[in-house]
Image: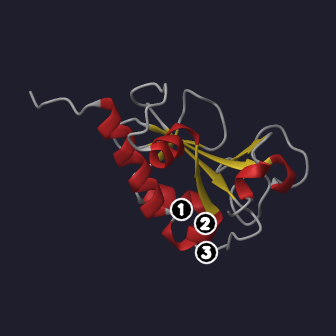
C-alpha cells in the first residue's frame, strides 16, 4: 500500500492543478480563502489553522472569456463536479480534494438558485457567492 499524501500537500496540489486548468482564464481567476491567506502571510506569527483541506477561487466574470469553457477545462484536468455536495462550482480533484469556483453575487448574472449565470459556461460550473466583490479590487 502506498504512502498517504498529507492533506496540506493534496490541497495545494489541487489548487495548482485547478490554476493550470484555468490558465486561459488567468486574468479572471483570483485566489481567495485560506490558501490566499497562507500565501500572503507566509511565516508571519498569526493564529491560523495549520492547513486547509480545499481551495477557493473567485471568478471575475468581467474578464472571463468563453474559450475554453470552464467545465471542459476542469474535466480535461481530471476534476469532476462533486456529486455529494449538490453545490454548483464544487469540483473534486483526481484525489478528492474540493476546489470551489465562485462568482461574486454582483457579477453572477440573473438571479438563479445557486449557480452563477455566466454564459457560455455551464450553470453548474461556478457558484454565486455573496460578499466576494472586494476580491475583485486589484491593489
Which residue in the protein does label 1 denote? 72
Q: Count all numbered tags in the image, as a single digit.
A: 3
The residue shown at (26%, 31%) is 6
Q: Are marks 1 and 2 in contact (CB under 8 Å)?
A: yes
The residue shown at (90%, 46%) is 111
Which residue in the protein does label 3 denote? 67
Image quadrant where one finds the C terminus: bottom right
Q: Residues within 10 Å of mark 3 (few under 14, many from 20)?
A: few
Q: Label 3 vs label 2: CA separation?
A: 5 Å
Q: Label 1 vs label 2: CA separation?
A: 5 Å
x%, y% of residue 125? Answer: 64, 51
Vertical arrangement, residue 39 with respect to residue 29, above or below: above
- Identify the mark at residue 31; answer none if there is no mark: none
Vertical arrangement, residue 5 with respect to residue 57, above or below: above
x%, y% of residue 37? Answer: 52, 41
The one nearer the camera, 72 or 50, is: 50
Quarter of the view holding residue 29: bottom right
Which sits earlier in the primary sequence, circle 3 or circle 1?
Answer: 3
Q: Label 3 vs label 1: CA separation?
A: 9 Å
Q: Residues within 10 Å of mark 1 (few under 14, many from 20)?
A: some
* Numbered disc 1: secondary structure: helix
In this picture, residue 16 sits left or right of residue 3: right
Which residue in the protein does label 2 denote? 69
* Numbered disc 2: secondary structure: loop
Quarter of the view holding residue 42: top left
Quarter of the view holding residue 62: bottom right
Q: Are marks 3 and 2 in contact (CB under 8 Å)?
A: yes
Image quadrant where one finds the N terminus: top left
x%, y% of residue 57? Answer: 59, 49
Q: Residues within 10 Å of mark 2 (few under 14, many from 20)?
A: some
* Numbered disc 3: secondary structure: loop
Amino acid at each position: 500500500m502506498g504512502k498517504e499524501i498529507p492533506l496540506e500537500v493534496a490541497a495545494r496540489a489541487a489548487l495548482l492543478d485547478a490554476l493550470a486548468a484555468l490558465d486561459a482564464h488567468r486574468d479572471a481567476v483570483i485566489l481567495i480563502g485560506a490558501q490566499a491567506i497562507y500565501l500572503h502571510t507566509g511565516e508571519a506569527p498569526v493564529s491560523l489553522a495549520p492547513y486547509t483541506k480545499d481551495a477557493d477561487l473567485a471568478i471575475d466574470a468581467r474578464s472571463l472569456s468563453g474559450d475554453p469553457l470552464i467545465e471542459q477545462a476542469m474535466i480535461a484536468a481530471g476534476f469532476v463536479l462533486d456529486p455529494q455536495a449538490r453545490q454548483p462550482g464544487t469540483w473534486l480533484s483526481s484525489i478528492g480534494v474540493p476546489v470551489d469556483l465562485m462568482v461574486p453575487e454582483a457579477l453572477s448574472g440573473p438571479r438563479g438558485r445557486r449557480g452563477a449565470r455566466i454564459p457560455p459556461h455551464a450553470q453548474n460550473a461556478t457558484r454565486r457567492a455573496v460578499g466576494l466583490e472586494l476580491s475583485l479590487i486589484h491593489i
